[in-house]
Amino acid sequence: MHLKFGSDLSNFYPNRGLKVYKPNGKALELIVNYTDPSNRQEHVEKYGTTENVKLGFIRYASTNRKFQEIDDVPVYIYPADLLSQKSALFGMTRTGKSNTTKIIAKSVYELRYPTESGNNQLRIGQIVFDPNGEYANENAQDIDGNDNPNALKNIWEIHEGANKADEVVTYGITEHPSDPDRILMLLNFYTDENLQIGKEIIDSIFADDNVIYMKNFQQVAFEAPDPGDRSALTRYNRRVLAYRAVLARAGFNSPSGLRASTTGLFNQDLISAMQNSQSNNAPEYQSAAQIFSSRNPTWGQLGNAFEALDKFIRDRQSGYQAFETAYVNRPNGSGNRWADEDLKKIIGIFQYPNGTRKIGKAAAQHCEDTEEDYAEEIYNHLVAGKLVIIDQSSGEPELNKSSANRIMTKIFRENQRQFIQGTTDIPEILVYIEEAHNILPAGNNLDLTDIWVRTAKEGAKYRIGMVYATQEVSSIQKNILRNTANWFISHLNNTDETKELCKYYDFADFEPSIRRAQDKGFLRVKTLSNPFVIPVQVDKFNVIA
């Protein structure tokens, strides 16, 4: 028997004088698992697989009557539907979103162990941003009656002989007692290689901070000048020195081998002007001049000196204006001012105690002993087809968002670069975002340059898929919703959300059920290959059957 379904109807027939049959058993299984043959063919051509996995059982309503004979009718999904696509999981807390996410991640992981002959082995890199630590750690909701730890990080145990190091890697801001192999997401903000990376992390934390001195600070970038341009190199080194002093004031431990050097960075006429100042703040300027004259002051001393220098530049009675006029008009000079605008924006932070305190929020991602960039490491793990779990449960919200943005930017740019270069084997990567409202732009945000919006709109051609889960449909930007192909919907309790959902596919037919039925794991599912929405009771995730 061959079935052929479309997504609409061309004719309607009255049931008067006809018999209407309600399918169950095998007939129902054929109908609910029908997929468009062209989609299956695309799976073969693109991925070399027609593998499908069981999601759960068909369920019409909250009241599940035995006589309907559908309790054992399985529903399957094609993991290939999720690759290079956007997938949404919506529903109130404790309605089964996390369990469904684990089932989805497991189905994609299983593609490396095909059950049907002729299917390719696919190692798909998956990364989970885990704000509550429920995927990276065992917790009470993951322990069944047989003491089976069902945290997603243990998925490698499904297949005998699998090596955890080749399959799963976990990252976090802090260590965890039950995860000795965890890699800490730390970066040395002081090293020359990481100056701009660390600065971008700090900037992203305060992207929404409209305080002028913080906005000014965010505008500074560290791009090394031509080594042959001595003037530009001196100015650059002076800015780096000031920035490192800001880091030290903000609580970033400095590397033991990194010594501050003022050699050749401070004009002798400036030192004299500070020493001879007639301002009321003259003692402070004189102390700073002594520090700048020292060859290797401490970072703490430099912080105090740069704070005084900022005052000296602003103070109309300090004598700085006279020095600067002479500096600009000196014979054979460049005509530029001694203090460039970027230097002023950096040292201006010292006038505001709250400025360095804000910057100190990023200190949790700093380690003075490391030389590696964790974003680069994570991308390499994904290219190798590993499941990467980012435990963000111990981080501040701003820090979690900034690190997620940086990792996502790395993934996007690397795959985009390979696409532009014409690479044929761009790595397939699937990104999972739990509590997506904390990371994705809000529903009323129209910024199309946001990295998550760009991934939603352009990710398919760069082979980046996205699975996002949250409680409210309206909390997600419409550009992301409009580019979502797979939908997994559990209970929503108000009409505002269900009406928003009704804009997509035929969820309007299920609106009353979505709003009334509160059963855990009872979802309405629409996937790319299936032409209609299916009501499903999703299986419980298990690592060991």
Image (spheres, rainbow, N blue to C red):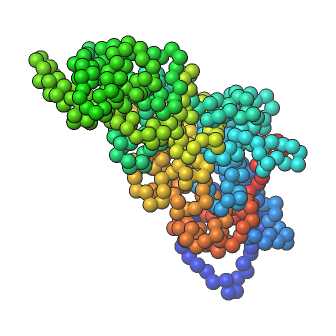
Left or right, 341 with reference to 455: left
Q: Is residue 334 above or below residue 136?
A: above
The answer to which image quadrant residue 379 occupies is top right
Residue 116 showing in the rendered view: no
Which residue is nearer to you in this view: 237 or 142?
237
Q: Is residue 438 above or below residue 70?
A: above
Which residue is nearer to you in this view: 291 or 545?
291
| Quadrant location, the C terminus | top right
Residue 249 showing in the rendered view: yes
Q: Could you tell me which residue is drawn at 76 percent across and 54 percent down?
A: 539
Left or right, 35 with reference to 405: right
Q: Could you tell me which residue is drawn at 69 percent across and 40 percent down?
A: 136
Left or right, 178 with reference to 331: right
Which residue is nearer to you in this view: 481 or 110?
481
| Quadrant location, the N terminus | bottom right
Label total for image: 0
Q: Residue 25 in the image: state x and y as whole percent.
A: 80, 64
Q: Residue 374 in the image: state x and y as whole percent.
A: 55, 29
- Residue pushed farthest right? 146
The answer to which image quadrant residue 267 occupies is top left
Q: Could you tell me which residue is drawn at 51 percent across and 29 percent down?
A: 252
Q: Is residue 538 above or below residue 421?
A: below
Q: Could you tell me which residue is drawn at 33 percent across and 27 percent down?
A: 283
Q: Residue 231 in the image: state x and y as whole percent.
A: 24, 19
Which residue is nearer to you in this view: 4 or 176?
176
Q: Residue 58 in the image: state x and y as whole percent.
A: 74, 63
